[in-house]
Amino acid sequence: MKTQTDQISTSEKSRVDELPARGSLHTDQFQSSDILTDSKVEVTETILNDHSPSTACSNSDQATAPEKPRIKIYKRRWYILALFSLMAGLQAGVWNQWGPIARTTERMYGWTDSDIALLANWGPIMFLPSCLAWSWLLDTKGLRPTCLLASALIALGTGFRCITQSQPTFTWLVHVGHILNGLAGPVGKGGVAKLSAVWFPRQERTTSTTIGFVVIGLGLGLTFLVGPLLVPEIETPQNNGTVSSLENVTISATEGWNTTEADAVIEQRRIISFYLYGTFGVCALLFIMMCVYFPNSPPHPPSVSASRARMDYVSGLKHLGRKRRFWQTAGAYGLSTGTRDVWGFAMLDVNLKAHGISQADAGWLGFYGFLAAAATGIIVGRFADRFQRRLRLILVLLDVLALLSFLWMILLILNIIPRTKEELYAANIVKSVVNGADSPLFFELVCEVSYPVAEGITNLSLTAFNNVASLIFLGLLSIRNIGTVWMNWFLIAAFSVSILLLVLLGEGKKRSDVDVEEIKSDEEN
């Protein structure tokens, strides 16, 4: 006697045998569903529970359809973003550590403006030969090994600077440290949009990318605050030249330096050592924390587009090379942000020094600017998440406002407009407000226009344009006796061309279209 289950199984088998005869499903199509083990189990369970042949047939048909990915959002995504952002912020802060205290270090170690420019230039110099390797590692091996290696390089680079302060060894160790830190730069700046795509849903991607860039900005801003506060300018007799080593302090003291001045130099060196040791300690601690927990990806994707396969590395690279919209977006990003980053961060003190603005005032200008950028960056990023299909328009408006604010600040710096400290601070804050969110929006826009190329190669290729522009800018500054006035008009020209490229950027299919189409399909069903 057959059991009820046997009867249902027999009924189901007979229905499946009839399918080819009806012409509704080919035999090879049905056999291909054998790999869907989970779907077959679900069909059997439904049959046994419902005892309905019609339900069984319906579920069998569904088993042959492509299975939708399971979408899940994890709370731990914010912790992962925090660790990554801290790593990126530290890398940026180490890159900019000497610029805000340029006047003191030039006198202490016998450096020049060209030496400060070279230290900053190691970032773009080391970016270019390592960019492709980092993008390959990020797209093929994932976030964890890439970020651990980058964090290790930052910690190692800051550690080298703590070995000794004896000249000329100290100067060489500082350069080695900046080379190692520069090698980690592509990950710090180019990896945040990749992390957003892997861990965050569509409606949070721009916000999370913006948070990463805000922390980078805060890392840069802290160097403008902490550097001049810890290492203030020192007054030395003008006829004694610069002090290049601890041994020279004793000699100089016998040639006109009084004991107080010699002690001040020794104290400054001690403070700089404390500054460097503290930086190394924070970088080493972060590396340990990332070793303990920093997974490659969540167990389930946060969006439909995150679950879709991307082009392989070589195909993606070739696709970017042929894509005109990528070149326009990358060119606009590189020209505007590459020159802006050098003008406003690494060389701000050098530029302002030539116009009688003190190191302390330059430091406060930089710090207040970053606070303003952090506050507005997150707001604009959240707004852009709600209007993802209007990223290009938002960027055009931001760049136009940035151009006007930079022009205002430059006219004040050059004293073409009568300058007061209050006006200079106001111009800098306005400039920082409108510049606070453009970088993350560029990264999200280039991911949109380059899809389905993987985010790693897309973002690091974009960052390469930023570093090429920075390299050219700093390379020109390394020419002795070139001055600093040209820096201001170079910046204005770069933003003007960037705006033109964005205005001419055409429309096309975007990454967000995949998520929007899926949402519409679910609503219709």
Image (cartoon, rainbow, N blue to C red):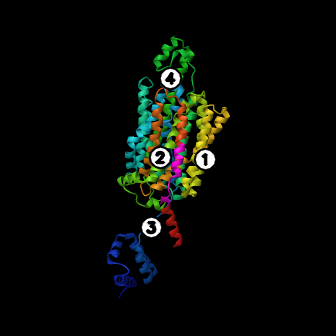
Tell which of 325 and 250 is nearer to you: 325
For mark 4, what is the residue? Answer: 108
Task: Report helix, strand or loop for mark 2.
Answer: helix
Of the two numbered discs 3 and 2 on the same chain, state the one appearing first in sequence. 3
The label number, if any, that marks residue 331 in the structure image: 2
For mark 3, what is the residue? Answer: 68
Could you tell me how far apart the alpha carbons at marks 2 and 4 are, in whole angstroms?
39 Å
User: Residue 230, how many percent across, how many down?
Assistant: 56, 29
Contact (CB < 8 A) between labels 4 and 3? no
- Residue 11 visible to the viewer: yes
Q: Residues within 10 Å of mark 1 (few under 14, many from 20)?
A: some
The label number, if any, that marks residue 338 in the structure image: none
User: Residue 400, how many percent across, how many down?
Assistant: 58, 46
User: Residue 141, how many percent across, how many down?
Assistant: 38, 51
* Location of residue 33 (image quadrant): bottom left
Of the two numbered discs 2 and 4 on the same chain, state the one appearing first in sequence. 4
Q: Residues within 10 Å of mark 4 (few under 14, many from 20)?
A: many
Report the predominant secondary structure element of the magenta stretch.
helix
Q: Residues within 10 Å of mark 2 (few under 14, many from 20)?
A: some
Magenta region, residue range: 495-512
